[in-house]
Amino acid sequence: MTKSSVRVCVRTRPTAQFAHDQLIVKPESRTIEVNLKKNPAMGVVNNMRENYTFKFDGLLHNSSQETVYHECMDEIVQGVIKGYNGTMLAYGQTGAGKTYTMSGGTESYKARGCIPRAIQQVFGEVSARPDQSFTIRMSYLEIYNETLFDLLAPAGVIAEENSELQVIEDSKGGITIKGLTVETANTEEEAMNLFFEGETNRAIAEHQLNSSSSRSHCILTVHVESRSRVESADRVLVSKLNMVDLAGSERVSKTQSTGAILREAMYINKSLSFLEQCVNALADRGREHVPFRQSKLTHVLKDSLGGNCRTTMIANIWGESSQLEETISTLNFATRMMRVKNEAIVNVKMDANLLVKKYEQEIRELKQELAMHDALSDRKDVQYDPYSEEQKYEIAQTIRAYCRGEMEEIQIQSMRQVRELLQQFKHLYNSAVFDANNGRASAAAVEGQQDEGEEGGGEEASKTAGIGQLADRDGFSIGRAPDAAVPETSVKTAELQRSPLKQGATSENQSPKKVVKKAPPGAAKPDKNQAFEEYKATVGSKTHAGLRDNLAALKDKKANQRELALSINKCKKEIDELTVQIQVRRETTVDKQDESSRELVVDEEEFALVRTLKERKQAYRTSFEELKVCKSEVEYLNKLAEQARAKLVLDFESWYKQEYEDEEEVNGVENVDGEVMDDAEKFDRLEVERVMAEDPDSLAYHNAAKNVFRKTGVGARGKSKRVKGEANPQPIV
């Protein structure tokens, strides 16, 4: 366990109007001095404080994104890989650069923020540890107007009102969000896709101080599980990395907000005020109660503030003279945050399945040791494994002999034998009681059957003798089948066994091989498009057929996904209509009833509406689960199709070079389907080549940003507006 304070770094927003005379930044000593001028309008007696001095763990003045990341997040990510929880918070007034610090700008790869850099470092650390097996999962949570939203929820699905996300706290103080989507990311590009997808769903708006102001608090969480491939694999390290982009505090007198934006500002300032109260309570050692449950934000961040976590906060300030009041408020909060103590421990859990296997192995080894001990002690008949049916029958016979007086005593060898003896005693006792009550009737029935069999006589009676009759009144026996009762051999089966495969015939497990003749030397080389068509029809027919099947299945699944989304939205609308109808009827019923009668009377029509509402809610939940399964199948089929395309192209290139040794420039470039690429596809290929030449590590970032742009038509920070009742906000182009 490591006990440490929250680490706080201050970053100044670059501006041409920096107040150098009032805001003195000293990066060497990591201190900031603020000198205020007294306002003459306040009169002669003015007790306003003029000078402030603040010292922090880090001071980032006019620093690059790379410097900020290495100063603030590098150690946290390394700790997450080792099993420690980590949190990065960006705090400050609106327009101070919090979102730019966390998410970065989309104008260049170097301008990316701490979140994409942390994702890249996580997968870099994973690839550098081949002796460990890692599982990376991601979730993206938004707190908008004190309501939790899932930024990775399936698009186009309306959220059910009763299915609101809930903050759950376990016995150890850990916080989880019930109902939040957690997606698995196998590669860096998949993780970037999830990050950019969540960014496009964020609620942002424009006001006087910021053209792209975040209207909500967002928390991107990377869940990391690791286990050793060399040592015992039942020990699993579980950690999480929270990257929090808080909405900025606002002064309505400066932002000039009205309407919905004013309402959002009220919720933002209220939640930040509750956050400050929690920090003050944590910094005060005499306080026993910390009001984490006052807001959704503080409840979600409970384990990051004073809990099992390594936390770093970046306080963003705007160093202009007009923003000095907000700057002092931010620096005061950052100073109080430095007094918060966290206790981080390595999170270890045991894999239940591997523990079961381990315990089974230990049981086998202990049994072997017992067997060796019994052999050395001359105890040969000791049984430790469960008794088989034959052994149970022998014990039953032993008990019968003992009860008839044929044996004086039963030799006890083990406790397992004692338990089995008692079980057989119990079974024989129950059988004796049953036979005492029904013995005469059973005997009469058996005699009647025997008489009928004797009257029938002949061969059939002798063939079926003993089948289905009571044997010695000890149990029911199916008897012994006659020796001649052998199933006849099928004629077709015999013919197939006798007839070998003819020359040229193919069995089910043998696929016919299509031979392609190699072009003779000096022959004219065909066009590459024609060669690709020939390859798909001959050598690559199997791969091409698999690609066609994958694409057809993908098309069907996408159609099914659209139908499920429409069905879910229809159910949601019906649920809303039924809820309104029930509410109207109840209000009408209450008005008609006498004031003295407070009991709510439910008539048949209202009961039918309630029952229909319950059915529609059940249909909604069922369809929603089906949609989640369908979405995972679509993603899986997409991957299969991409792999089949890549394999088809690579195999064709290898085949073409082998068939036609001389390289030849072909007019146009073919895509995976053998068609000539258009200008957009050629541009994509040139862009990939340019990125690989400049910085190969940036390819995943560029591909993810390009995929999100193609889906939404806007960048990762495209403007979006939260609409009540929607699962995801609609982008505003």
Image: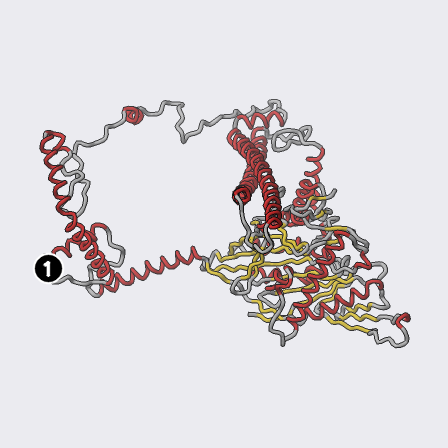
Mark 1: give few (<14), some (14-19) or many (20+) Cα within 10 Å: few
Closest to the observer, 293 or 557: 293
- Across and down, in percent, residue 503 comes to 38, 23
Asked whether, in this view, residue 339 is left or right of residue 377, the answer is: right
> Can the viewer see residue 461 in this picture?
yes
Quadrant of the image containing the C terminus: top right
Residue lying at 18% horizontally and 55% vertically, measured from the top left: 429
Residue 380, percent across and down? Answer: 20, 60
Q: Nearer the viewer, residue 235 or 291?
A: 291
Q: Identify which amino acid the numbered label 1 is placed on.
A: Met
Residue 214 appears in which quarter of the rendering? bottom right
Q: Residue at x 85, y 66 (%)?
A: 20
Residue 685 higher or lower than 215, as above or below: above
For residue 378, above or below residue 395:
below
Secondary element at image label 1: loop
Q: Does residue 651 appear anywhere in the picture?
A: no
Would you identify the image quadrant in which residue 414 lies? bottom left
**Vertical placement of residue 120 versus 646, above or below:** below
Q: Is residue 705 above or below residue 9?
A: above
Q: Position of residue 89 (x, y in %)?
A: 67, 61
Read off the residue under disc 1: 407
Nearer to the camera, 34 or 117: 34
